[in-house]
Image: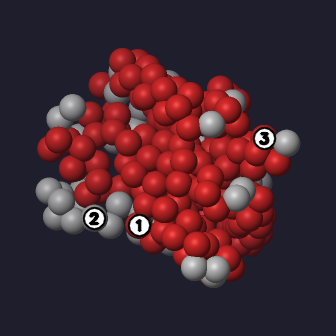
Amino acid sequence: MNLRTLAAAFSYFTIFPTVNREHTPPASAAFGYLPIVGIIIGAIAGWAGYGLSLLGLQPLAIACAFALPIVLTGALHVDGFLDSCDALFACVDPEQRLRILKDPHHGTFAIAYLAVAVAVWIAAIAMLPPVAWPASFALAGGIGRWSAAINLMRYPYAGTERFTTVAVMANAFLLGVLSMTVAHWARFALVPVAALSLIIGEWAARRLGGRLTGDVYGALIIVCEIATLTIYAALYGR
């Protein structure tokens, strides 16, 4: 593991100040550390929420568990989700959709689909017992980012042509091991969420003329993270 590359990934994809003070896109190798970033961010949020629940502050615990990943990533992926909703659902040609992605303003599609996403997100958190939050949030953060990153093999972004299958498989192995060691209900999300990501990635690329952008990858992370938590909530409830 290259610690400097890992630090560069944290500099760009989180609010933690490390080596990348100018907040410029990191080298392609840093994208291979995205799942590790997600695991750590998710674990922090999960433990913080669980700690508040032990104090009897359940509503505040749910709010913390929901909000902390957004805060710690500087709302980077949420912004991509909002931009992507406005662009991908617009009834315009691909070039116009690419222009919409660059527009800092958010429209009806962004607001409407964010409301839907937040409702499902919070419902999934509330369905899970707080004791399961640290593991489920860590894995949701990792699986969500890995599922988005597998699209980089087909649709490179920001110099990620060197993002190889080796990095994808290494992350899959790491997430698989973590899933097998926490609880039986955590083992089932990796494959369906990855499939969902590939389907959405293919659909989005067609809408954008055969490419994906950083905003779309951010949206994929949000959707896949919510999907992972939803699967966990459904399986845990059984």
Residue at image position (75%, 49%) is 233
The x and y percentages for residue 11 are 26, 57
The x and y percentages for residue 15 are 32, 67
Marks 1/2 in contact by CB < 8 Å: the verdict is yes
What type is the residue that disc 3 sits on?
Leu
Q: Secondary structure at mark 1?
A: helix
What type is the residue that disc 1 sits on?
Leu
30 horizontally vs 2: left or right: right
> In terms of depth relative to the viewer, which is nearer, 80 or 43?
43
| Mark sitting on residue 16 | 2
- Coloring scheme of the render? secondary structure
163 horizontally vs 110: left or right: left
Mark 3 or 1 closer to N-term? 1
Residue 114 seen in the current view: yes
Reading the image, the residue beneath label 3 is 235
Foreground tag (2 vs 3): 3
**Which quadrant is the N terminus positioned in?**
top left
What type is the residue that disc 2 sits on?
Phe
Mark 1 or 2 closer to N-term? 2
